[in-house]
Image: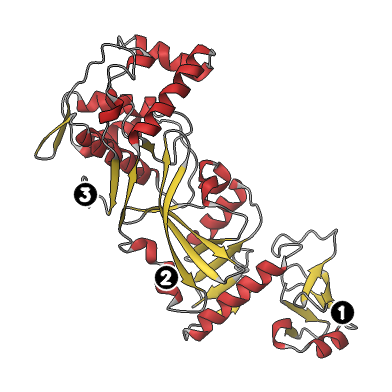
């Protein structure tokens, strides 16, 4: 904690004071601005000075055991905003929210520098609380949060989405003082994360423009080695089915009703080799709903309506509307069907061209001829906006 007040209600910012002066101030009693509990002024020789609650403190507003990394990062962003000529406040307490962002910019933009774990419930509560009171939150993730962990709910909750840049989040490299935007984040059907990234030096450029970068054209293209990925996913499915995997058995039972077998599915059940990050399990259920629409011909909007009404299970994304992730799934599937020549397009109507597999994959489906899958950003327009 950087701010505290003394018995005379005088507020002190430790970042604006010399160490010698702070050592003298250690004799005084200091209190938290939010909970008014007594705090301790700590002035060491290595770590920057700060205020700390007692171990038994019940304060829910100011985090405990703030790391030197977190303290240094929020100071860097505070200075960056000030250098840009913006009004900035460190640890501004917002009584109507009972929250305090690490940095508050122009009175309405809340920067949260997250260096430690936070529960989905707490993250959702804080984010919705900011939005309900007219604040725009930006979550910047500390060094412990890695892009490769985007397969886990602990990371997924931080993701944002925009059709120009796909799934994205901001990460911080404290050592090199860099802000990294990971975007176009995809998960292969084998559970591996692929993404693009762009880096910014903290303190250089216009901070607010950079924070809004995902909402403008990032662009780029990602290509996936379909043959390698699909061979791997086929082998995994085969092993799970033989081992009596509960989910795979339930899928197989459903496929029987359609005269299909898990190991001899039409090729569009294997393609594209990627799936949106929001899916908890394999994408069979989602594909079946979509394909049932496309078999007779359908618009993208009708497919979206069918998927939304199916109430399919997915991960929680507090920063993303469910409609957005459904549309992303439809975009990827339409692109995949077109790539393997299983799609007929007439105006705004899309129709599935059936494929019949006669033998167990991979013998019938010539894997050596499977085209690589390329995704370009931004996506081609499928939906009628507005």
At horizontal 26% and vertical 26% (from top left) the residue drawn is 291
Residue placed most toward the observer, 78 or 339: 339
The answer to whether mark 2 and mark 1 are in CB contact below 8 A is no
**How far, Cα to Cα, is label 3 from label 2?**
25 Å
For label 2, the SS is helix
**How far, Cα to Cα, is label 2 from label 1?**
41 Å
Tag shown at residue 210:
2
Residue labelled with disc 3: 380
* Nearest-to-viewer mark from 3 and 1: 3
Horizontally, residue 54 falls left or right of residue 132, namely right
- Quadrant (top left/top right/bottom left/bottom right) for the N terminus: bottom right
User: Against 81, is 291 above or below?
Assistant: above
At horizontal 55% and vertical 73% (from top left) the residue drawn is 104
Q: Classify mark 1: residues with Cα within 10 Å, few (<14), some (14-19) or many (20+).
A: some
Q: Classify mark 2: residues with Cα within 10 Å, few (<14), some (14-19) or many (20+).
A: some
For label 1, the SS is loop
Mark 2 or mark 1: which comes first in sequence?
1
User: Against 304, is 155 above or below?
Assistant: below
Residue placed most toward the observer, 267 or 41: 267
* Nearest-to-viewer mark from 2 and 1: 2
For label 3, the SS is loop
**Residue 365: x percent and y percent?**
28, 21
User: Against 150, is 258 above or below?
Assistant: above
**Residue 130: x percent and y percent?**
52, 61
- Residue at the far right: name it: 27
Horizontally, residue 137 falls left or right of residue 27, namely left
Q: Quadrant of residue 35?
A: bottom right
**Residue 62: x percent and y percent?**
71, 65
Residue labelled with disc 1: 29
Q: Is residue 133 visible?
A: no
Residue placed most toward the observer, 222 or 26: 222
Tag shown at residue 95:
none
């Amino acid at each position: 904690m950087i701010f505290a007040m003394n018995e005379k209600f005088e507020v002190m910012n430790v970042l604006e004071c010399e160490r010698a002066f702070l050592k003298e101030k250690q004799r005084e009693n200091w209190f938290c601005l939010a909970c008014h509990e007594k705090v301790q002024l700590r002035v060491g020789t290595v770590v920057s000075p700060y205020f700390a609650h007692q171990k038994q403190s019940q304060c829910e507003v100011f985090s405990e055991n703030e790391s030197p990394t977190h303290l240094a990062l929020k100071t860097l962003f505070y200075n960056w905003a000030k250098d840009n000529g913006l009004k900035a406040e460190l640890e501004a307490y917002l009584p109507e929210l009972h929250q305090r962002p690490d940095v508050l910019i122009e009175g309405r933009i809340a920067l949260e520098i997250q260096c430690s774990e936070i529960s989905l419930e707490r993250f959702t509560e804080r984010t919705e609380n900011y939005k309900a009171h007219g604040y725009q939150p930006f979550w910047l993730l500390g060094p412990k949060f890695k892009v490769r962990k985007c397969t886990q709910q602990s990371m997924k909750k931080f993701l944002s989405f925009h059709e120009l840049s796909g799934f994205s989040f901001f990460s911080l490299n404290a050592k090199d003082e860099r802000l990294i935007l990971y975007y176009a984040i995809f998960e292969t059907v084998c559970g591996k994360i692929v993404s693009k990234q762009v880096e910014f030096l903290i303190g250089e450029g216009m901070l607010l423009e950079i924070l809004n970068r995902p909402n403008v054209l990032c662009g780029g293209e990602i290509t996936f080695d379909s043959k390698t990925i699909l061979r791997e996913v086929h082998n995994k499915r085969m092993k799970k089915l033989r081992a009596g995997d509960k989910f795979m058995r339930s899928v197989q039972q459903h496929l029987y009703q359609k005269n299909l077998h898990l190991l001899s599915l039409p090729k569009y059940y294997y393609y594209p080799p990627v799936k949106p990050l929001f899916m908890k399990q394999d994408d069979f259920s989602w594909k079946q709903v979509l394909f049932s629409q496309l078999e007779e011909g359908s618009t993208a909007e009708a497919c979206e309506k069918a998927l939304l009404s199916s109430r399919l299970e997915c991960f929680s994304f507090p920063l993303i509307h469910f409609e957005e992730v459904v549309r992303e799934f439809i975009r990827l599937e339409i692109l995949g069907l077109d790539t393997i020549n299983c799609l007929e397009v007439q105006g705004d109507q899309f129709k599935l061209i059936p494929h019949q597999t006669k033998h167990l994959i991979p013998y019938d489906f010539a894997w050596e001829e499977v085209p690589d899958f390329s995704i370009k950003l931004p996506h081609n327009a499928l939906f009628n906006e507005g």
